[in-house]
Image: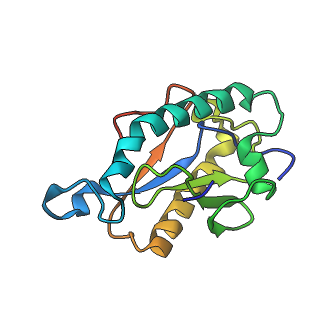
């Protein structure tokens, strides 16, 4: 599932929202999707390490003001599989999905919001709008009956235990 505009955008592993189908919706509590072969999940260990390393690298450059990978995706310099886009947010499929439906929802304007820990009162509107956009994406993806929204914050915010 897929992986930004020039000036001020949100960054890395900091404050992206991830939509994941709820495990409660799987029959008999099965956690594996029929869409993926079993070896797909074996690769999660290695890909989790890669995703964590990428998140740490992106978080390190987030506050420097330079372009991040998300900036490049918004600017269409890096291709992505866009699920939803409007004037405030961009939602695209993760290139290394950890769930059958794994979409990142990011704001198009950074405005100092490089992580949830950097949130200030002026960010209240965009933070709420990100959740609203997650709802729109869930409806478009056909999972509105149940899904999980995950917010990673900082290089240690990636939870290796969250595997759907």
Task: Point out the image quarter for the N terminus.
Answer: bottom right
Q: Which sits in the foreground, 32 or 136?
A: 32
**Residue 159 in view (yes/no):** yes
Q: Residue furthest right?
A: 7
Spot occupied by residue 108 in the image (x, y as percentages of width and height): 74, 53
Residue at 84%, 34% in the rendered image: 66
Residue at 30%, 53% in the rendered image: 38
Spot occupied by residue 111 in the image (x, y as percentages of width and height): 77, 41
Q: Which sits in the foreground, 48 or 158?
A: 48
Q: Which sits in the foreground, 116 or 5?
A: 5
In the figure, is residue 132 to the left or right of 147? right
Give the quarter of the image for residue 57.
top right
**Residue 109 in view (yes/no):** no
Is 159 above or below relative to 143? above
Residue at 75%, 43% in the rendered image: 110
Colouring of the image: rainbow
Is 141 above or below relative to 127? below
Residue at 50%, 74% in the rendered image: 140
Spot occupied by residue 22 in the image (x, y as percentages of width and height): 31, 57
In the figure, is residue 137 to the left or right of 77? left
Q: Residue furthest left?
A: 28
In this figure, what is the number of numbered marks?
A: 0
Give the quarter of the image for residue 147.
bottom left
Q: Which sits in the foreground, 131 or 94?
A: 94
Spot occupied by residue 16 in the image (x, y as percentages of width and height): 58, 46
In the figure, is residue 112 to the left or right of 94? right
């Amino acid at each position: 599932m897929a992986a930004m505009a020039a000036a001020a955008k949100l960054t890395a592993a900091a404050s992206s929202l991830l939509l994941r189908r709820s495990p409660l919706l799987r029959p008999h509590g099965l956690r594996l999707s029929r869409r993926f072969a079993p070896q797909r999940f074996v690769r999660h260990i290695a890909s989790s390490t890669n995703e964590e390393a990428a998140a740490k690298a992106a978080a390190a450059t987030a506050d420097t003001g330079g372009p991040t990978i998300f900036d490049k995706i918004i600017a269409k310099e890096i291709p992505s599989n866009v699920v939803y886009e409007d004037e405030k947010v961009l939602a695209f499929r993760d290139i290394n999905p950890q769930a059958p439906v794994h979409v990142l929802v990011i704001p198009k304007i950074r405005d100092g919001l490089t992580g949830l820990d950097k949130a200030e009162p002026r960010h209240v509107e965009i933070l709420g709008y990100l959740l609203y956009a997650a709802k729109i994406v869930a409806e478009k993806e056909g999972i509105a009956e149940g899904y999980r929204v995950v917010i990673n914050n900082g290089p240690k915010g990636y939870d290796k235990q969250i595997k759907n």
